[in-house]
Amino acid sequence: MRSQVAAITKSEFILFLREPSAFFFTLIFPLLMMLLFASMWGNDPFSGEEYGYVDFSVPAFMGMVMATSFIMSMTTSMAAYREKGILKRFRAAPVGPFPVLTGQLIAVFAVTLVGVMLLLIAGFLFFSLRFYGNIFEFVFVFLLSAGSISALGFIPASLAPTARSGVVTANIMYFPMLFLSGAALPWFMLPDLMKNVSQVFPLTHAIKLMQKVWLGGHFWDYPVHLAVLTGFILAGIFVSVKYFKWE
């Protein structure tokens, strides 16, 4: 089992590095977005606050990295494998869904960590990024958020029959979340109707929770965010294990 997971993880990570579009939109695009907006607004503290734009927005750009990697990359790659019969060959090996999905998850999570590190390095080097929270609490909410977004991505990744349908499904999920969750634009700038709509997305709760803890809050003070993220993890695991399609 471990050797199967390790082999799939290594293969997926190498394949990702060989895909220019996935590499750019997962690792470079969120960094460019942060640099663009930070160069416009800087990181001077807001009026009456200790933190500035970059301090507030880095967790949001982390959420963008998560969404791009766990939804766009994972959904499209698994759907393409299903269409080409690669998953069918895994099954004949035999390789169960657990090594396949776990290997995908580890590889994509590793890519996510690289993207997050690029954001942090740029923030600290160019904009004097400040962290006000507890590092252990933030690591916990980061992992919970990553687990929730990956679980959401597992659902279409387990079901999409073709690469084309995987791309369409990923886009339908990705772009509304990107613009309504606070990842691309600050959530408080949205109209009230859009704020209400955004509550159905786990990325909204992930970004809010990471921002709160980053700026000094405690995760246990936000039970709604915790419950929503945990619920998506359980739903994603259930659908992926029960309804995973090999072909």
Image: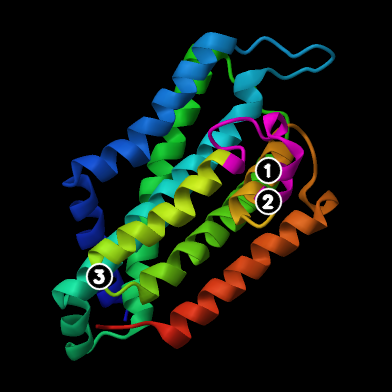
Based on the displayed image, in which of its 4 quarters is residue 11 positioned?
Answer: bottom left
Residues at marks 1 and 2 touching, judged by CB atoms closer than 8 Å: yes
- Badge 1 marks a residue whose secondary structure is helix
**Is any atom of residue 118 visible in this view?**
no
Instruction: Name the residue carrying label 2.
Output: 197
Instruction: Name the residue carrying label 1.
Output: 194
Q: Which residues are magenta?
A: 180-198
Alpha carbons under labels 1 and 2: distance apart: 5 Å
Which of the image's four quarters has the C terminus? bottom left
Amino acid type of the residue tagged 3 in the rendering: Thr
Q: Image height check: is 64 above or below 231?
A: above
- Badge 3 marks a residue whose secondary structure is loop
Q: Which mark is residue 7?
A: none
Alpha carbons under labels 1 and 3: distance apart: 32 Å
Residue 22 in the image: x percent, y percent?
A: 27, 45
Instruction: Name the residue carrying label 3.
Output: 162
